[in-house]
Amino acid sequence: MREPLLVLNAGSSSLKFSVFETLLDRSLVAGAHGSVESLDRASRLVVRDSNGSVIADRPAIQLGYHGAIEVIHRWFADHIGSESGFDGIGHRVVHGGEHYQQPVRIDNSVLEIIASLCPLAPLHQPHHVEAIRAVSAIAPGVPQVACFDTAFHHTLSELEREFALPQVLTQKGIRRYGFHGLSYEYIASVYADLQPSWSTDKVVVAHLGSGASMCALRDGKSVGTTMGFTAVDGLPMSTRTGSLDPGVILYLLKQEGMSVDEVERLIYEQAGLLGVSGISSDMRTLLESNSPSAVHAVQLFAYRAARELGSLVSLLGGLDALIFTAGIGEHAPTVRDLICRRSAWLGIELDSNANEANRALISSDDSKVSVLVIPTDENLMIAKHTRRLLDADR
């Protein structure tokens, strides 16, 4: 394999990865991918080829990120036929704060800054830090690159970024950052190529997955998004509240006697689809259920998405295209239909057959707005950034 790149996405209990080969023209081809699951108990490495067939399934000798990185590195070193293994490793890092508006090579100072941002993304950032440190210990000679979900939103205006807080707090970095930027960047990069006649002036992308947000794009640049200071803001998600009156937090602390840690668990892990339905955080499970609470959770999700869409359209001054992506956006026609029905006032009209078939273009011929389903590829975006930075340093 020529100059292979490893892309890592570290989660709380698993480490997902993808491998990309570098061709002679410096373009990238996706190869094997997989994960190390159950990092805290009986960890196993599962590797699949580009067709999805399992080509490796073996236990990790050690637990945690150290064990995960070691088993990944060892297997691929043997498979690639090189002790060095990878030409470079790219990490998805959720929060770059005000420090990073572009991907960056990781050194000790960069890692310190990434670690300092853990309070802003407590569900994600600590795991990114652990994975980076594990790579440094297992393969210290392999360069690492951090690609930030917040970086794409550096084009937000000052008015879009700012809360109505005293300036002394704003100057400390308490502002809206936005997330899912790697997904939005990928969608922006491929949208114009799908149909050159489509306008890129007023586009909204709905990244609907276990984490969910929406972004207003003008000519491929972010001008507004639903997530703010942290990745708990905006739309309801699998287990996160989405937008919440800060007075509710105060009430929980003062009147319900909840601790700060209990409130944090509530808004990040016990709310959203799970909290509303009382059944599951998985949209697929809720769509298959006849329970009134499951139906209500789905309706609330779609209602809030349509409401946020209206806000972003107001910011853009109109709408040329609505793009659905990520797990729910790509695979849940019922949810897309609910959102678009509530947004019919914009001139949106779906082709029901195309929507049910998850086709790329799901709007009808009479729709004033193009509605599309475009699969996202954050890993490819990370690999491209990693390849570019490594080549620039040579």
Image (tube, grey):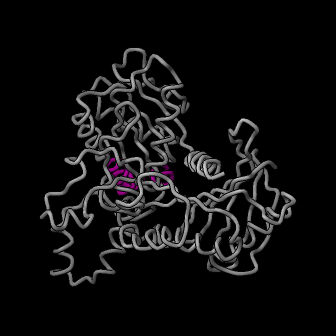
Among the 4 quarters of the image, the one containing residue 380: top right
Q: Above or below — where is 391 with respect to 251?
A: above
Q: Residue furthest front?
A: 394
Check residue 17 for magenta coloring: no
Where is residue 233 shown, x and y percent of the image?
Answer: 31, 58
Q: Above or below — where is 355 with respect to 99?
A: above
Q: Is residue 267 left or right of residue 330?
A: left
Residue situated in front as seen by the camera: 197 or 24: 24
Q: Above or below — where is 392 with respect to 251?
A: above
Q: Above or below — where is 92 with respect to 253?
A: above
Among the 4 quarters of the image, the one containing residue 364: top left
Number of marks present in the image shown: 0
Check residue 285 for magenta coloring: yes
Query: What residue lies at 75% left-to-right and 54% top-to-bottom?
Result: 48
Residue situated in front as seen by the camera: 164 or 212: 164
Where is residue 125 shown, x and y percent of the image?
Answer: 46, 68
Query: What residue lies at 48% left-to-right and 57% top-to-bottom?
Result: 282
Where is residue 387 shown, x and y percent of the image?
Answer: 63, 48
Residue situated in front as seen by the camera: 115 or 195: 115
Q: Predominant secondary structure in magenta?
A: helix
Magenta stretch bounds: 283-301
Where is residue 181 shown, x and y percent of the image?
Answer: 43, 49
Residue 257: tell me if it is visible. Answer: yes
